[in-house]
């Protein structure tokens, strides 16, 4: 075989392990005893309305899905006060990041991202031989002025994860507006809002207003994987100017989002109660961790998402020790944060179990 050199050199994304795999490795019989708080999933589970819609949709899976996602597009457009032409769906928002790199990145061009930001931007960019410029994040926060300064004529994409994964930090709505105003026309700004639904109201950005006003080089990515509790279905969406959506649509496979995923997403959008309960679970859990973790002598980073970054010292050793106590978190060395772990907020019982396990590990 003679694969392309830059493909064989690629680093593969290291996702959180499935519970079953950890149970097998550590010899635990009952997976129900394991607390997996490693992938920022919704521990309340999916909306019951979505489950019902999926059950109904299953009988139609002998047919290809609607590639244009007609009903979902109409429903979401109405909710977001945009036009259906402003929307595109992906097999998770991850796929939309790959579409962006497919359309804009190549050798000699660069993508700008935060030094401690979501790794998929770097990995997708590498697929197309783009250079990645990592801008330092003082206090773990995106420095939008420094990102603007890093732009060169070769820059094609600037990615701002807000809140950022894995730090949970946010940028203010005012800082975003100033950034968008100064953004050069040759660069597309990607606002990755994977955790938008659980953000504190005062910090929720309104990037969509720029898109409604006709801004061509701004795109918002969101997902049904987090607050909506549908990570296993793989469905996310982009909101942008119709011209940018048309470009991204050129690299999309015709049936990239399944019938079941579309049906679940339509139903999930109706389930306001599920989202309200999710928000309450997350804010209650963050309060709990912010109060209890410092008592163990560890530092936390204020979070606007459904997870919290914790400085425990030797994150990988703590991760392994927690695993032996049936708790799965994420070590943060791949993000250049070797002293940290990331904990997803769960239901109160899981949070307490997690805290006791960490107490045990650190004592
Ligand atoms: C910032 C950010 N963007 C995008 C994603 C991708 O989510 P999905 O592909 O499940 O929609 C994640 C998931 O962890 C994330 O944290």
Image: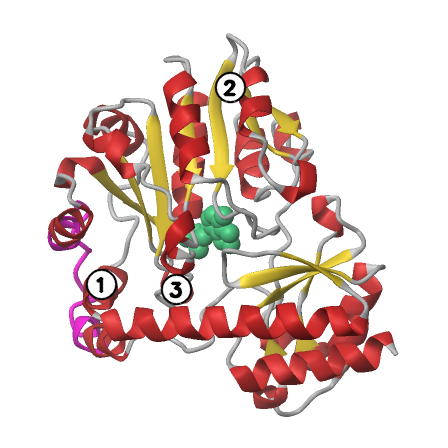
Q: How is the image coloured?
A: secondary structure
- Mark 2 or 3: the one toward you: 3
What quarter of the picture does the C terminus occupy?
Answer: bottom right
**At 40% across and 39% down in the image, what residue appears?**
173
Residue beneath label 2, please?
A: 106
Residue 227 has which mark?
Answer: 3
- In this rendering, does residue 130 appear at all? no
Q: Is residue 57 magenta?
A: yes
Residue beneath label 1, please?
A: 269
- In this rendering, does residue 318 appear at all? yes
- Mark 2 or 1: the one toward you: 1
CB-based contact (under 8 Å), mark 2 and mark 1: no
How crowded pointer 3 is (Cα within 10 Å; few <14, some 14-19, many 20+) is rated as many
Q: Which residues are magenta?
A: 55-73
First of labels 2, 1 by sequence position = 2
How crowded pointer 1 is (Cα within 10 Å; few <14, some 14-19, many 20+) is rated as some
Q: CA distance from mark 3 to mark 1?
A: 11 Å
Identify the secondary structure beneath mark 3.
Answer: loop
358 lies left or right of 201: right
């Amino acid at each position: 075989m003679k694969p392309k050199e830059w493909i064989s050199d690629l680093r593969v994304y290291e996702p959180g392990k499935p519970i079953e795999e950890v149970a097998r490795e550590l010899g635990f019989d009952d997976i129900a005893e394991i607390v997996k708080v490693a992938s920022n999933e919704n521990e309340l589970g999916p909306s019951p309305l979505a489950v019902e819609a999926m059950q109904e949709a299953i009988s139609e899976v002998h047919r290809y899905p609607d590639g244009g996602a007609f009903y979902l597009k109409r429903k979401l457009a109405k909710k977001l006060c945009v036009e259906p032409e402003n929307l595109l769906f992906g097999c998770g928002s991850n796929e939309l990041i790959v579409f962006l790199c497919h359309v804009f990145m190549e050798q000699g061009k660069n993508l700008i991202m935060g030094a401690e930001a979501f790794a998929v931007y770097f990995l997708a960019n590498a697929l197309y031989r783009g250079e990645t410029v990592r801008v330092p994040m003082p206090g773990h926060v995106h420095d939008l002025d420094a990102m603007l300064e890093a732009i060169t004529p070769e820059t094609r994409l600037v990615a701002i994860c807000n809140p950022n994964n894995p730090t949970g930090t946010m940028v203010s709505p005012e800082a975003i507006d100033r950034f968008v105003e100064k953004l050069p026309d040759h660069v597309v700004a990607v606002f990755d809002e994977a955790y938008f639904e659980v953000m504190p109201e005062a910090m929720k950005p309104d990037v969509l207003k720029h898109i409604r006003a006709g801004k061509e080089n701004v795109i918002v990515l969101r997902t049904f994987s987090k607050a909506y509790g549908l990570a296993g279905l793989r469905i996310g969406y982009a909101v942008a100017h119709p011209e940018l959506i048309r470009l991204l649509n050129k690299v999309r496979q015709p049936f990239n989002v399944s019938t079941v995923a579309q049906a679940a997403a339509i139903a999930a959008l109706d389930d306001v109660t599920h989202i309200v309960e999710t928000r309450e679970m997350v804010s209650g859990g963050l309060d709990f961790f912010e109060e209890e973790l410092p008592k163990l002598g560890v530092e936390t980073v204020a979070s606007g998402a459904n997870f919290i970054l914790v400085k425990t010292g030797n994150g990988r050793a703590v991760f392994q020790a927690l695993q032996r106590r049936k708790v799965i978190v994420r070590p943060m060395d791949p993000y250049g944060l070797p002293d940290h772990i990331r904990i997803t907020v769960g239901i109160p019982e899981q949070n307490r179990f997690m805290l006791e396990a960490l107490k045990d590990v650190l004592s």
